[in-house]
Image: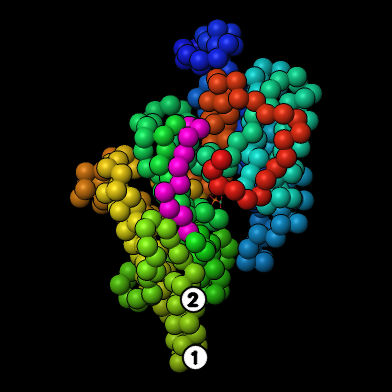
Amino acid sequence: MGTNINTGNDDSQSVRNKDIYILGIESSCDDTSAAVLRNAVLLSNVTASQAVHEAYGGVVPELASRAHQQNVVPVVHEAIKRAGITKEQLSAVAFTRGPGLMGSLLVGVNFAKGFARSLGIPLIDVNHLQGHVMAHFIDGVGCPPYPFLCLLVSGGNSQIVKVHAYNDMEVLGQTIDDAAGEAIDKCSKVMGLGYPGGPIIDRLARQGNPKAYQFSEPHIPGLDYSFSGLKTSFLYNLRKWVADDPDFIEHHKEDLAASLEYTIVDILMKKLKLAVKQTGIKHVAVAGGVSANNGLRNAFQDHARRYGWTIYIPKFSYTTDNAAMIGIVGYYKFLDGEYCSIDAPAFSRVTFE
Ligand code: KG4
């Protein structure tokens, strides 16, 4: 199988008609993941999640870095094995350079550097957020045409991004405080549910009434988001209800989850609808951990039907942190000869460069 893409750089002749094998490595938070792609096609995607954080109701950075150190070698080994190739066949190593937890990033960044150097192959740095957006291009089928809009919703980010090209993304709006996933996780925590809260709230919400409770919605101008007011409103209401009835949460957790999810999805979709109106772009994608949410997926389908959007919803396995999305960006950068130097540092903040 060969690629036939004009890369526009001097090396394009040698790159064309030759299979390219990219190893992607992701370690920005609490998932250690490695993937191998042959061109844009995913051959393997192995992820080790870290159960150690469950007891703390959130990710403990120091524990995350230590778990990455334990996981990175076996996870990479397994990804290469499942891909059915040898490490000598790899064309380049792509890694998440940021944003994320610094200690976690350092494990993946330094492993990638050492591995690429030992194999004598290029090293490619990838922005984690760019990876989430580009998850839609894995396997090269059903890819959104440029430009498209992407609602990027994860534990640390809530953004509306206008995607001009894989390496040209414009943030049209973003949260001014908490991210949507963070708000869900914190509300789940105050209800005494487990971590991460997203999948638990999603499951409970399926059995609840989304109109049972109303929580305050933000009034932020433009395309920016805010979720901290909602979180506070949820907490204060809950305290009041629990003071009246100590078993309130146990008896009403489905309705609470459904109402919380409904409010968050409503906030997300209102601004996205405005972005579609302002830009005239009706190809709309969703990405990031919260895009696994059933209420949000249903809202996308509903908007597609009502407003004629063409929507792009990722496979569940590409929603939360994974190395396949790092590998696909690595593949495009490889075609463009966009390599990074061995001394490129990790970065913890910054959105799109
Ligand atoms: O993208 P991600 O894996 O990590 C970051 O880069 O932040 O996103 C993690 C977030 C967490 O807040 C988690 O609770 C949320 O995604 N999440 C969900 C669901 N699955 C994961 N939120 C709502 N519904 C879900 N099914």
Residue 166 position (above or below residue 292) = above
- As drawn, the label of residue 140 is none
Q: Quadrant of the C terminus?
A: top right
**Does residue 2 sit above or below 39 in this rendering?**
above
**Magenta extent:** 166-175
Question: Is 169 covered by the magenta stretch?
Answer: yes
Asked where in the image residue 63 lies, by quadrant, the reply is: bottom right
The stretch drawn in magenta includes residue 316? no
Residue 300 appears in the picture as rendered: no
Does any atom of ligand 1 lie closer than 8 Å to the CB of label 1? Answer: no
Indicate the secondary structure of the residue bearing disc 1: helix
Q: Residue at 78%, 30% (x, y): give it.
A: 114
Horizontally, residue 350 falls left or right of residue 200, namely right
Is residue 40 positioned above or below 262 on the image?
above
| Disc 1 residue type (three-letter) | Ala
Describe the element under mark 2 as helix, strand or loop: helix
Is disc 2 surrounded by few (<14), some (14 to 19) or many (20+) residues within 10 Å? some
Q: Classify residue 294 as left or right of residue 26.
A: left
Give the percent coordinates (x, y) of residue 133: 47, 40
- Numbered badge on residue 232: 2
Quadrant of res 33: top right
Q: Nearer the viewer, mark 2 or mark 1?
A: 2
* Closer to us: 248 or 212: 212
The CA span between labels 2 and 1 is: 17 Å
Task: Pinpoint residue 157: horizontal percent, then vertical percent.
Answer: 52, 54
Q: Residues within 10 Å of mark 1 (few under 14, many from 20)?
A: few
Which residue matches tag 1? Answer: 243
Magenta segment, prevailing SS (helix, strand or loop): strand
Q: Position of residue 11 (x, y in %)?
A: 59, 11
Q: Position of residue 259 (x, y in %)?
A: 37, 70
Q: Amino acid at mark 2?
A: Thr
